[in-house]
Image (cartoon, coloured by chain):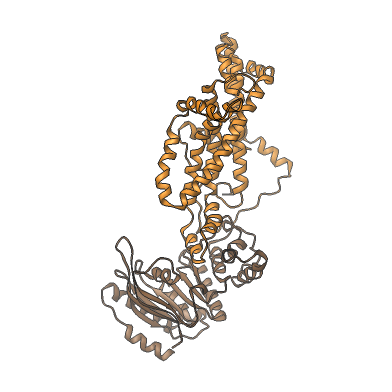
Chain colours: A orange, B brown
Amino acid sequence: MLRYLTALILELQNLLMGDRFHLSASSDRTNGLVRMTAKPVGKAAGLPQLRQFLSPDLLAPVGVGLLVLAFWEVAVRVSGIQPYLLPGPLLVLQTLVSEWGTLFPSLIITFQITLAAFVVAVISGLLVSVLFTQSKWIERSFFPYAVILQTTPVVAIAPLIIIWVRQVVPGDNSTFVALVICAWIVALFPIIANTTLGLNSADHNLLNLFQLYKASRWQTLLHLRLPSAMPYFLGGLRISGGLALIGAVVAEFVAGTGGTKSGIAYQILISSYNLQIPRMFAALLMTTGLGVIIFVALTLLSDFLLGKWHESAVQREN
Amino acid sequence: MTHPAITLSDVSKVYSNGTVALQHLSLTIGEGQFISLVGPSGCGKSTVLRMIAGLGKMNSGQIEWNGGHSQRQLAFVFQEAALMPWATVQDNVRLPLKLAGVSYSASRAAVAEALELVDLNGFEQCYPRELSGGMKMRVSIARALVTKPEILLMDEPFGALDEMTRSRLNSDLLNLWSQKQWTVVFVTHNIYEAVYLSNRVIVMAARPGRVVADVAIAAPYPRTEEFRLSPLYGEYCREISSALAQAANGQDGAIATSNQRAAEYA
């Protein structure tokens, strides 16, 4: 659990620093010393787990968080600041509980948009990367356009996308599709950039070996390039998952859809219009929570897939 | 003289940056010979192996396969172990068979046999990161042996290992070679290793890459640790290192005398 929190904080820092394409893949040492890792002793033992739970590594950040919340609550009460300017954390929590019935369905809508955009981005990103690595010319010709797609601010083109999609897809689904497209544009590039890099960084000796044994292009892709790209691809997924959510929220802001199919961003927008600031904070908290859940889920997936072999996921004693 | 297995005639290779890796190189590799290519870096010794393996094109010259041999019977061992980190030892060794379309069950016996040869039974399920440098190299050799090759090309396979591991793997390799009757072309920059292993040492020089001496090592196999301490061994090492020094000073030579000895030995 702690590892994910630390990874999460690092990742958030990366996002804040604008470092969107950083790689979590660490270098893999192929030669050198004996590297026998001791297998962790059975997790069933209850006492070590409890001790881990109470370790300063976990207690320290949680303590800091609680301290800040307490200070916030006290400051709000002492200063008598109005809740429509800054609500205290307890009021936010109360509002979250009381408004759960209206906020949660909206969150689900946003989650559906995010998930759809993410899945489409993963599939299309993977296909485009594979296409890029089949020929240097394809990569050279099309990569700049992938960059252009990435650097165009989605806020600016969202209205256009909404109008166009309305022409093609009539009815209720039109907004959903438009929002998915907006979130997809934001989520696509990290997958393409990372996966292309990964597919191109297969070990050259292994590439020679495949050539020596007369491996087909397909065999080389399946048994060498794709596994080599796996850590990079998974790094791309973690960036992309968060971006899909951000893309969905931004697009919802632009679309400003009301009615039964409105997402969480619409709730934030309405709350701010109505000066229901505690409700706005509650919706914001839910959105952030969803982002954290997406990140943790993708980190777990990454560790599960790389756990046995990649340096980034291997636990060492030294 | 043994029957030729591979004949290189007048092979030249110029890389796109203008480096002359090989110039008019001719070399006959006899069946069952253990040949070492020794020389400074940049003398094209690795390029010779790559040309034989068909990795990259020659600019001129030709390579002929004799005695019913073909490129299909060769195996290559790289300087690094070059293992797939995501695959177990077993799956790494199976790779050449998998690429050839052999099924999992049909390849099982061959994989077990190859691991047996390099003394790695019991490590089938390990991942490369769990192995020492020497063990990784053994896996790499097992992968080369799994197709039952007749010709083994080895490009400084033990260069990155410590001295103890290197001499252990040297004697293991010699044992295997005497059992299996392979033809081995072994690239190294280590004169002592070359003399210990080979029955023929080709000394190469750089800029342009060429052969400057061809020394037959007429010591009987099996070679023990005592051979490393014998006066004969020291004499060969001296001869090869003086050929290297002469080549560095720009005087090619020594070919005639060594060819005489090679004739006596054969």
B244 horizontally vs A68: left or right:
left
Determine the residue located farthest toward the left in the rendered image.
B250
Task: Mark yes or no: residue A6 visible.
Answer: no
Is residue B54 depicted above or below A198 in this figure?
below
B205 horizontally vs A150: left or right:
left
Is residue B32 depicted above or below A12 in this figure?
below
Q: Residue at x 49, y 44 (%)?
A: A194
Q: Nearer the viewer, residue B57 or B192?
A: B57
Q: Nearer the viewer, residue A145 or B208?
A: A145
Is residue B138 depicted above or below B261 in this figure?
above
Q: Quadrant of the N terminus of chain A?
A: top right
Coordinates of residue A112 in the picture (x, y in percent): 62, 31
Determine the residue located farthest toward the bottom in the rendered image.
B264
B194 horizontally vs B116: left or right:
left
Q: Residue at x 41, y 70 (%)?
A: B51
Task: Mark yes or no: residue B222 visible.
Answer: yes
Coordinates of residue A168 in the picture (x, y in percent): 54, 30
Residue A61 picture quarter: top right
Coordinates of residue B211 in the picture (x, y in percent): 34, 76
Coordinates of residue A246 in the picture (x, y in percent): 53, 29
Q: How many marks?
A: 0
